[in-house]
Image (spheres, rainbow, N blue to C red):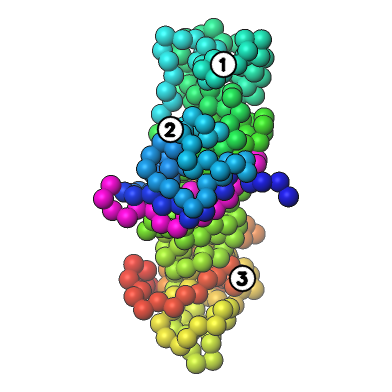
Amino acid sequence: MSAPGLLVHRLRAPFGAAPGLEQISFSVAPGERLALVGASGAGKTTLLRAIAGLGPGGADRLEIGGREVGALPAERRGVVYLHQTPLLFPHLTVGENIAFPLRVRGAHSSDIGPAVRDVMAALRLDGLGERRVQSLSGGQRHRAALARAIVARPTVLLLDEPFAGLDPVLRHEVREAVRAAQASYRPALVLVTHDLDEAGTLADRIGVLLHGRLAQVGPPSELFARPATLEVARFLGLANSVLGTIEDDGRFASPLGLLPAGLPLAPGPAVAVFATGAIRTAADGPLIGRLVELRHRVQQTTAVVVAGGVRLEVVLDGERRVAIGEEVRLAIAMEAVSIFADATPTGFRRG
């Protein structure tokens, strides 16, 4: 089995005088994309900078391509850290900016030109090599900064909110540039983002950073359908939550009726959480509710339905048109519902 592109074991990094990150462990395979999400101040940037050797921190083991690098300076780790703001030298052309890391590393001049041309082609920068960076569009500047980051082919690429502050068109352009950059030579890639939809679209796995620790790491489909804890579920902002009680027989009693709890839980207060996609209108659904609102989005239209006194956001089945005030039937995919014991159910909506 080949070595991971990045292996982090029991990393620690302070937040000033505070304890900061503790016991952070994960690995990223070559060609894999891991997105880190968490609230502002959770330590996402601190983690990237500690891995890159640009900030304080240490780990029991920190390997890049199977090589221990924890004691090495940043420039010898085989890692490139790219901040969200593209930093390019204004006195150099686009081609000279991209070639700069290779010249610093003493690459032979006969190798620099082909390497620059290859990365520019991969990121759709052909024909811009002689341009000054001031003449570039926002998307071109981001792609040029990304080209400079990967031209020396680092084993690990760390991207700190690479799409922050971009309009939707530029976000798509830079996101596709990231895909192209990784496809060109398959580095292990870790990116920080605040956008859960973006993380789910781009990443192979998502890591949720809460209170200085990785609360859960998994594929987007697993994370959104099966959050490991109630705190992770609340962070993910799953649209639906239903308060209830675990009965003595292990079932979840709620305004929606008796539901199987899945995992065994002790009797007492509990909450069921699930995404919009876990519940939909269905002609033969066992639940009955009344439609009170339609929410139109670019990707889909959802409905807000009150059932059993609880407001639920549901997916429309698309078979027929519905109107506000109409009675609808609902079906829940219980495999996508997570039920947790909850002694302090504040923050969830009651009908």
Chief SS of the magenta region:
strand
**151 versus 216 height, above or below:** above
Disc 1, SS: loop
Sort mark 3 into few (<14), some (14-19) or many (20+) by Cα contacts within 10 Å.
few
Residue sitting at 43 percent across and 15 percent down? 89
**Side of 233 relative to 34 (left or right):** left
Disc 2, SS: loop
**x%, y% of residue 174?**
53, 31
Residue linked to disc 3 = 335
**x%, y% of residue 86?**
44, 25
Residue linked to disc 2 = 83
User: Mark on residue 106?
Assistant: 1
Name the quadrant containing residue 46. top left
Q: Nearer the viewer, residue 256 or 76?
A: 76
Disc 3, SS: helix
Label 2 vs label 1, nearer the camera: 1
Label 2 vs label 3, nearer the camera: 2
Q: Which residues are magenta?
A: 16-39
Can residue 58 be seen at all in this image of the molecule? Answer: yes
Does the magenta portion include 106? no
Give the quadrant of the C terminus: bottom left
